[in-house]
């Protein structure tokens, strides 16, 4: 048994959440959270002095505490002074993100729970690991978030990441999409290196198979073309700033123009920075407004992953401070890879380049704010475990950045609760605190509508009706720190 697996088994046993041999989700005692302020994520203000009754894994009732109908055998949890919100969703991460089938999923599943995350959208990973992990969680053999996944990426050659399936033409697109559907994926993930022909063939195959496709806007496709092709979500704002340029055709030509044959690493880097500077300088409010209107009309969602842009795509020296305190939860071997990668990325960086990165991040955040104002659906995602994106903790950073981008605290909270349920077509059973819905709930010590940073002040987590108190969550974190120090 690997050290990673040993950690998860230890954490699971410590929380009494291993149910070996179960064939269906276990039933838990009824629970009544009394005298709590409920923020149901529908858009309604906090409702004071409420009682929420949970029977098995469902919300049985939400009512004023004075009139609540509480089952006799229900365990009571006093919520006086506390705030109850739906469990959080990270709509973009990679559970096998360490680069091999078992990868980082073993160290960061406990970190997700400890940070109040009850559902995740895995945006590319190894099915041989994800399928049994999801099955064990569904059967109650281990505790974890609800998982929806894409399996391997569909990409061009050479692919950007593994696991990938290289798609060159319409025949391969049809076969590969069909195979993934047969394997039980929830959606198809497209990547950046795809050719135009392969991309549009995947879009056609996805329509034929009645499955959504999401992901990057490939480099050779415009964001406007992607939304018109039916791509349901765009990740990391790929193609969006270029689509907001007043001269996108020229930028695309320059992006694929061959550099000098005798180019050095430093000159190639300088050429890339020059292109980014033109991207910034050619920004057009008019062009961007038209693109955003198209997204809204076509119901194309956005997962901006601002925390990834800040920490990895456009990092500055200030970005490092945001992760220093929580690197203790990351295995040393992985943290060291992140450090080496940052060193390579910043090898030729100058103060002027750091200033450019800051401006690109600021513009990206401005565009996200404009999207929210224009009715484009926003999903909170992190791209954990990309470099310096610590699982679980990164989602709270993303929420804070979304508020900085101009979303209200309620709109921001909905990007990690109500919006993902709507996107996943699960609004009838998830996403808000209402009778009949799944009991995925997060109890906070302070009001997140007053300060979104209060989503970090977690008192307890309820996962499909299972109560994890603060002591249990602290135990998970302490064990994770110990494991990370040894690995």
Image (spheres, grey):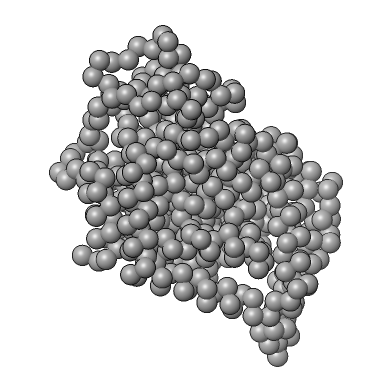
In the rendered structure, the answer to whether residue 63 lies left or right of residue 359 reads left
Q: Quadrant of the C terminus?
A: bottom left
Depth order, front residue of 123/416: 416
Residue drawn at point x = 25 percent, y = 27 percent = 29
> Where is residue 438, by image quadrant?
top left
Residue 473 shows in the view: yes
Give residue 63's position: percent from left, percent from top: 44, 14
116 lies above or below 322 = above
Residue drawn at point x = 24 percent, y = 54 percent = 9
> Where is residue 25, by image quadrant?
top left
Give residue 45's position: percent from left, percent from top: 59, 23
425 lies above or below 333 = above
Depth order, front residue of 155/460: 460
In the rendered structure, the answer to whether residue 261 lies left or right of residue 81 reads right
Give residue 327's position: percent from left, percent from top: 47, 63
379 lies above or below 40 = below
Q: Residue furthest top?
A: 67
Residue 178 shows in the view: no
């Amino acid at each position: 048994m690997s050290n990673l697996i040993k950690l998860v088994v230890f954490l699971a046993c410590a929380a009494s959440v291993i149910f070996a041999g179960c064939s269906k989700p276990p039933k838990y005692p009824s629970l009544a959270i009394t005298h709590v302020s409920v923020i149901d994520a529908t858009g309604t203000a906090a409702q004071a002095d409420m009682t929420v009754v949970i029977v098995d894994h469902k919300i049985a009732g939400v009512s004023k505490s004075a009139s609540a109908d509480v089952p006799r055998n229900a365990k009571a949890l006093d919520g006086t002074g506390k705030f109850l919100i739906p469990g959080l969703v990270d709509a973009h991460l990679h559970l096998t993100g360490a680069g091999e089938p078992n990868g980082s999923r073993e160290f960061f599943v406990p970190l997700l729970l400890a940070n109040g995350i009850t559902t995740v959208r895995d945006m590319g990973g190894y099915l041989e690991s994800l399928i049994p992990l999801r099955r064990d969680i569904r059967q109650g053999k281990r505790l974890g978030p609800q998982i929806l996944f894409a399996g391997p990426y569909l990409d061009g050659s050479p692919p950007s990441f593994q696991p990938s399936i290289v798609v060159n033409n319409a025949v391969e697109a049809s076969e590969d999409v069909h195979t993934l559907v047969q394997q039980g994926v929830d959606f198809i993930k497209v990547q950046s290196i795809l050719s135009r022909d392969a991309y549009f063939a995947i879009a056609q195959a996805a329509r034929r198979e009645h499955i959504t496709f999401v992901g990057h806007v490939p480099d050779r496709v415009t964001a406007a073309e992607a939304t018109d092709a039916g791509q349901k979500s765009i990740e990391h704002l790929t193609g969006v700033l270029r689509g907001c340029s007043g001269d996108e055709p020229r930028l695309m030509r320059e992006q694929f123009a061959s550099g000098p044959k005798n180019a050095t690493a430093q000159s190639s880097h300088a050429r890339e920075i020059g292109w980014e500077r033109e991207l910034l300088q050619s920004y057009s409010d008019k062009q961007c407004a038209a693109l955003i209107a198209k997204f809204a009309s076509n119901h194309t969602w956005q997962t901006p992953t601002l925390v990834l842009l800040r920490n990895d795509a456009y990092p500055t020296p200030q970005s490092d401070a945001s992760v220093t305190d929580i690197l203790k939860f990351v295995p040393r071997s992985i943290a060291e890879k992140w450090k080496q990668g940052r060193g390579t990325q910043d090898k030729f960086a100058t103060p002027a380049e750091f200033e450019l990165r800051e401006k690109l991040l600021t513009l990206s955040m401005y565009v996200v704010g404009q999207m929210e104002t224009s009715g484009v659906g926003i999903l909170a995602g992190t791209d954990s475990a990309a470099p310096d994106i610590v699982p679980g903790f990164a989602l709270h950073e993303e929420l804070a950045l979304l508020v900085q981008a101009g979303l209200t605290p309620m709109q921001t909270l909905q990007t990690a609760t109500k919006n993902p349920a709507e996107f996943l077509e699960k609004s009838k059973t998830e996403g808000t605190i209402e009778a009949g819905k799944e009991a995925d709930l997060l109890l906070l010590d302070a009001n997140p509508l007053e300060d979104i940073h209060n989503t970090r002040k977690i008192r307890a987590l309820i996962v499909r009706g299972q109560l994890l108190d603060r002591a249990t969550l602290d135990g998970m974190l302490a064990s994770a720190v110990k494991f990370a120090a040894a690995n």
